[in-house]
Image (cartoon, grey):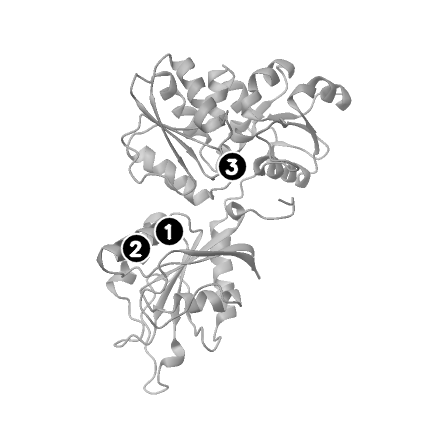
Amino acid sequence: MSLNATPSSERVRIAFFGRRNAGKSSLVNAVAGQDVAVVSDVKGTTTDPVPRAMELLPLGPVVLVDTPGFDDEGDLGAMRVGRAMREMNRADVAVLVIDASAGGNAGAFSPTEKTLAELFGEKGIPYIVALNKTDLLPDSPPKKKPPPPSSAVPFIETSAKTGMNIEALKVGIAAAAASAENGRRLVGDLLKPHDAVLLVVPIDKAAPKGRLILPQQQVIRDALEAGALAVVARDGEIAPALAALGGKPALVVTDSQVFAPVARAVPEDVPLTSFSILFARYKGGLDTAVRGFAAIGALADGDRVLICEGCTHHRQCDDIGTVKLPRMIREFSGKEPEFVFCSGGDFPEDPSPFAAVVHCGGCMVNDREMRHRRLLAEERGVPFTNYGVVMAGIRGILDRCTAMLREPLIK
């Protein structure tokens, strides 16, 4: 992947919700300016969330998502609504699409739409209302429209068919997205211009041939944007890398799997952390992860531990999630817990059967989804921690690897 490409987890995720046949798919296509979603007059045409990564002015890199109708019926319909709900947990911005031609008071909020508005509020999702299909309304008598659920929620009359107010809808989406920005950085706030940061990147059979993995790319890019000097070395070349710098780096970031040799090679007074720990901080869950590590040492025989990766990939013979971490946890705890694995979007809605959740850095999962997963665990009293935090804790260097992240180097 190019350093200039924007991963889906870093794109603003804009999801369109509403009843069946409200015109969600047509509106997604109109906003995208291309056929992203299948359009039909048949209710329930959209059976699964349909994402499309693209550039959307004036916002930039986004993912547009069409979702199944929230009023779907029957057993199959309930499954579709469940998938729409899961998409809500990932959405940075929601567009509530209402059919203006649906009879009665044009576009009046139905119980389904009221439920959606309430869910957006509960989940803290900024949203706008698109009163769609206004081209089907008669010119006389004057059109009626429902009052907005809140004066703070933009209410835009649109027509996917004629293109009416599509540009205004885009501007509204961009404004809603701006309100959701968190302003967090991976390493940029830890570095000054011309600081040197040493990135330790093992090159082994698990490393993708010819490229760096996403966390490494993103840390390099953020360091460069801060005006810092990013130096990359393999784990067996730390001493010559430090010598070549001619002085101590402001920060060393390593792959968590080689914490032990890197910690020995890097002077104690040089801040040290890992890509995975940086991502725990970036996604807003570092304190939770550090607290959650205590559960690893308190495991009992037979306790169930969920190890979760946000992406899917080909498993190597010594895979970090399914082999290395379980082995390290068994050795550290002196117990024989039962390990359960999940990947991609496959996170349980009820993690209460587990004694702990150990999650990857989440480079392929957006902030909203990671927050949702943490909250699911916290609400049920299940400790939630992170690959890098666990590996640092097991090596006895957790304080060293998180201290500078809790008190940024730059004031």
Residue type at the position of mark 1: Met
Q: Pick out the residue farthest to the bottom.
A: 140
Asked if residue 73 is positioned above or below residue 217 in the image, the reply reads below
Using the image, tell me which numbered label, if any, was put on residue 168: none
Residues packed near mark 2 inside 10 Å, few (<14), some (14 to 19) or many (20 plus): many
Image position, residue 102 (x, y; %): 29, 74
- Residue tagged by mark 2? 81
Task: Tell me the quarter of the picture where residue 287 sits.
Answer: top left
Residue type at the position of mark 2: Val
- Earlier residue among tags 1 and 3: 1
* Residues at discs 3 and 2 in contact (Cβ within 8 Å): no
Instruction: For mark 1, give the secondary structure.
Output: helix
Between marks 1 and 3 in the image, the one whose residue lies nearer the viewer:
1
- Earlier residue among tags 2 and 1: 2
- Residue tagged by mark 1? 88
* Residues at discs 1 and 3 in contact (Cβ within 8 Å): no
